[in-house]
Image (cartoon, grey):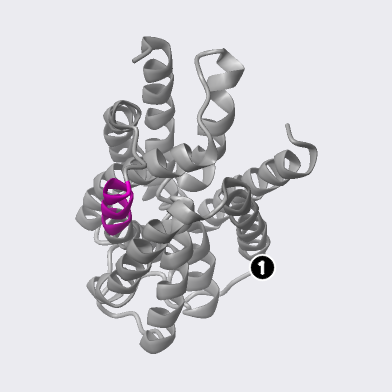
Amino acid sequence: MEIPILLTLLLLGLGGGFLSGLLGLGGAIFMIPLYLYVPPLLGVGQLDMKQVAAVSMVQVLSASLSGLIVHKKNKFVSTSILITMGSCNAVGNLAGSLFSKHTKSELLLAVFATLAVIAAFAMFIPKREQGGELSPDEITYNKPLAALLSLGIGTFGGMVGAPGAFIYIPIMIYLLNIPTRIVIGSTLGIVFLGALTGTIGKMITGQIIWPYAAALVVGTIPGAQFGGNMSKKINTKNLRLAIAVIIALTGLRMWYQIVFGI
């Protein structure tokens, strides 16, 4: 296996892990296009969308677990949300990852880009939250709606190789009225459960290139720890803005590739 592409993926994993821990996004939303575009740009190799979706799922698994540990320590993780939404996400991810073997890479890319753009615009809507000082165990939300939404997001996420954190965050903030910091911490837990079953599905169907996945994990774990510790020091409005900008740029860049082929 070529050393240059492994080093490239390790560095990408480091950056992706940091953003994952900082913003609660799991990492796939901004890492998938980097996996697609950076290796060929540097001349070290190229991965297609299915290969990227598979190794991305493993990277998200490690990033979300590493970030979750930090946010749990900072008391920004809701056990109720993890049980309600995490279990549904896990079931959906397993189903989606198994089905993804029979879908076209172009279709996955188009769906991913479309949902990214929609989610980004939602994040720019002004929002008054529940009390910002509420503990994770004190928040209230519509549990049946949360479970149904999580199942659908998980199924899509399993197909794309992205457990769907970029969709969870605006839905949890704007539809379920959950405070931003608890959304970020709890989303990493949801993503972890989804990525766990999603990774199993892609293992069963033989889609993972393990040396690539291992390089990503080595970089991701320390990056997520650092990002998670930084997150609690940043204003929630700035966190939402950063999430929105990253998601929007990612979705628009991927649609540019779909339309123009570059």
Magenta region, main secondary structure? helix
* Residue under the point 38% across and 88% down: 144
Q: Amino acid at mark 1?
A: Ile
Residue 11's image quarter? top left
Front-most of 122 and 139?
A: 122
Front-most of 2 and 89?
A: 2
Please say whether residue 135 is visible from this viewpoint: no
> Which type of secondary structure does the marked residue at label 1 adopt?
loop
Q: How many marks?
A: 1
The location of residue 217, given as percent across then percent down, is: 29, 33
Local packing at callout 1 (Cα closer than 10 Å; few below 14, some 14-19, many 20+) is few
Front-most of 2 and 142?
A: 2
Magenta segment includes 204: yes
The location of residue 169, given as percent across then percent down, is: 48, 63
The location of residue 68, given as percent across then percent down, is: 27, 52
The location of residue 51, given as percent across then percent down, is: 45, 37
Q: Which residues are magenta?
A: 196-205
* Residue under the point 37% across and 19% down: 6
Quarter placement of the N terminus? top left
* Residue under the point 53% across and 55% down: 103
Please say whether residue 126 is visible from this viewpoint: yes
Magenta segment includes 91: no
**Residue at mark 1:** 125
